[in-house]
Image (tube, rainbow, N blue to C red):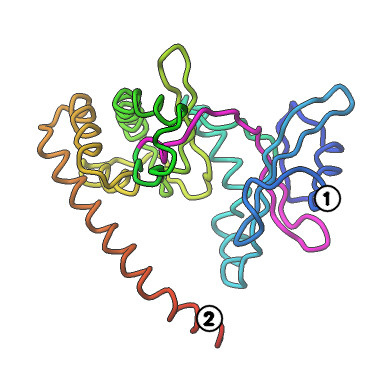
């Protein structure tokens, strides 16, 4: 077992034991499927911490070759990209370790801290998904702070782009939000597809955030705030964002429409 790296603050013995018992301990955050994620509480040898453990799907032959010789595994990239983000003062749960080809089934694992967050960008940008709970107190509180969160998120996005970070999976569920003294801190998760030191035009910046939102009113609030930092007219920012939102909506529509055909084709293969 040579393909691993562990944060110096953690013991290999405890982490290896945890992975060996992965199927028996903890609770699922994401049920088994393409990947699976578990929340596991460790309390031994004066070590007490809640871990978030992601077990990646086995890559196919071609992907395996690419990961081995070119990219590095998804687990390795998640670990290394998390460290890069923290170096650049961008929030992400603390990276603890990664293990490649671990155990009898030779699966890849990424271990990070289990971050206690208040909500995600999904609750902020997709109110239509929460129609059934909109009268509940917890969601009414989100309604009250929605605009402030969006404006602070626009600033966070601008800073992310200015630092040359292109997060390819910049989507609502991958941004965790913690409220502190009526301000908001943003933390990125699901990190294995990122680019660093990228020079971005307003076009590529808005393409990057276009999966985050669809609602016109909320998109305009975001653009109003982003424009203040990038020193461009708000209309230019919104024109670019709206164009890519429409493209993404069309893409999702086509993928949904063709899903039964693609599933049938996979079964035949």
For mark 2, what is the residue? 266
Image height of 225 relative to 133, above or below: above
The image position of residue 164, as x and y in percent, is: 36, 36
Please give the label number shown on residue 24: 1
The residue under the point 35% across, 43% down is 126
Q: CA distance from mark 2 to mark 1?
A: 31 Å
* Residue with the most extreme right position: 45
Dot 2 falls on a residue whose secondary structure is helix
The residue under the point 45% across, 11% down is 181
Residue 107 part of the magenta segment? yes
Q: Please state which of residues 24 and 269 is positioned toward the viewer in this rendering.
A: 24
Image height of 45 relative to 261, above or below: above
Residue range corresponding to the magenta coloring: 98-124
Dot 1 falls on a residue whose secondary structure is loop
The quadrant the C terminus occupies is bottom right
The residue under the point 29% across, 47% down is 210
Image height of 158 relative to 168, above or below: above
Mark 2 or mark 1, whichever is nearer to me? 1
């Amino acid at each position: 077992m040579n393909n691993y790296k562990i944060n110096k603050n953690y013991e290999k013995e405890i982490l290896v034991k945890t992975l060996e018992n992965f199927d028996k301990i903890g609770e699922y955050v994401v049920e088994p499927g393409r990947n699976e994620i578990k929340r596991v509480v460790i309390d031994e040898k004066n070590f007490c911490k809640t871990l978030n453990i992601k077990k990646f799907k086995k890559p196919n032959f071609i992907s395996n070759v690419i990961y081995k010789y070119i990219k590095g595994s998804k687990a390795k990239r998640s670990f290394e990209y998390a460290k890069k983000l923290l170096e650049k003062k961008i929030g992400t749960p603390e990276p603890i370790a990664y293990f490649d080809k671990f155990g009898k089934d030779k699966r890849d694992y990424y271990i990070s801290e289990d971050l206690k967050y208040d909500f995600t960008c999904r609750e902020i940008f997709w109110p239509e998904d929460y129609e059934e709970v909109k009268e509940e107190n917890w969601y009414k509180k989100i309604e009250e702070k929605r605009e402030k969160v969006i404006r602070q998120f626009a600033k966070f996005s601008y800073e992310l782009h200015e630092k040359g970070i292109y997060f390819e999976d910049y989507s609502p569920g991958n941004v965790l939000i913690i409220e502190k003294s009526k301000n908001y801190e943003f933390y990125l998760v699901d990190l294995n597809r990122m680019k660093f030191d990228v020079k971005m035009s307003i076009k590529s910046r808005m393409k990057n955030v276009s999966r985050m939102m669809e609602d016109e009113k909320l998109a305009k609030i975001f653009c109003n705030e982003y424009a203040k930092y990038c020193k461009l007219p708000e209309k230019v920012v919104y024109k670019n964002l709206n164009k890519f939102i429409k493209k993404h909506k069309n893409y999702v529509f086509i993928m949904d429409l063709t899903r039964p055909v693609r599933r049938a084709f996979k079964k035949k293969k």
